């Protein structure tokens, strides 16, 4: 799942890339987020807080009322290594 502004065509987005051991990881396409913004506990309050922070930091000079939510299924044939993003 990820989000991008609806009223502008943008090549930038922030996306969830994996969920592991109760944590979610965000993939930041334009490198505007810090590690603490990208890795957070998987609970509703934390998700809402971190998504709001990610939106504000990813699109600091824009005002957007709505965001598109996109769900993408990763290919099982391709290897993804997101262990780097999760606490040990």
Image (cartoon, rainbow, N blue to C red):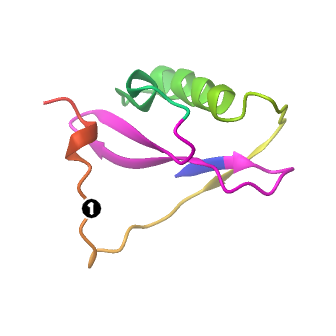
* Quarter-of-image position of residue 22: top left
Residue depicted at x 28% and y 38%? 85
Rendered location of residue 45, percent (x, y): 50, 20
Rendered location of residue 81, percent (x, y): 23, 55
* Quarter-of-image position of residue 42: top left
Residue depicted at x 87% and y 50%? 7
Residue depicted at x 36% and y 37%? 24
Residue 70, placed above or below residue 61: below
Magenta-drawn stretch contains 24: yes
Residues packed near mark 1 inside 10 Å, few (<14), some (14 to 19) or many (20 plus): few
Residue depicted at x 62% and y 26%? 52
- The residue labelled by disc 1 is 80
Bounds of the magenta segment: 4-31
Magenta-drawn stretch contains 45: no
Decide if residue 6 is on the left or right side of residue 18: right
Q: How many marks?
A: 1
Decide if residue 82 is on the left or right side of residue 48: left
> Which quarter shows the C terminus?
top left
Q: Which of 57 and 74 is in front in this view?
A: 57
Question: Looking at the image, which residue sits at the far left?
Answer: 88
- The secondary structure type at the circle numbered 1 is loop
Decide if residue 22 is on the left or right side of residue 69: left
Question: Looking at the image, which residue sits at the far bottom?
Answer: 77
Rendered location of residue 28, percent (x, y): 50, 43
Rendered location of residue 8, percent (x, y): 84, 52
Decide if residue 25 is on the left or right side of residue 65: left
């Amino acid at each position: 799942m990820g989000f991008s502004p609806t009223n502008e065509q943008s090549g930038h987005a922030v996306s969830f890339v994996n969920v592991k051991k109760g944590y979610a990881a965000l993939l930041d396409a334009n490198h505007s987020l810090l590690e603490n913004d990208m890795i957070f506990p998987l609970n509703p309050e934390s998700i809402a807080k971190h998504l709001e922070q990610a939106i504000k930091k990813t699109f600091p000079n824009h005002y957007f009322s709505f965001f598109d939510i996109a769900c993408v299924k990763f290919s099982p044939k391709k290897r993804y290594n997101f262990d780097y993003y999760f606490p040990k």
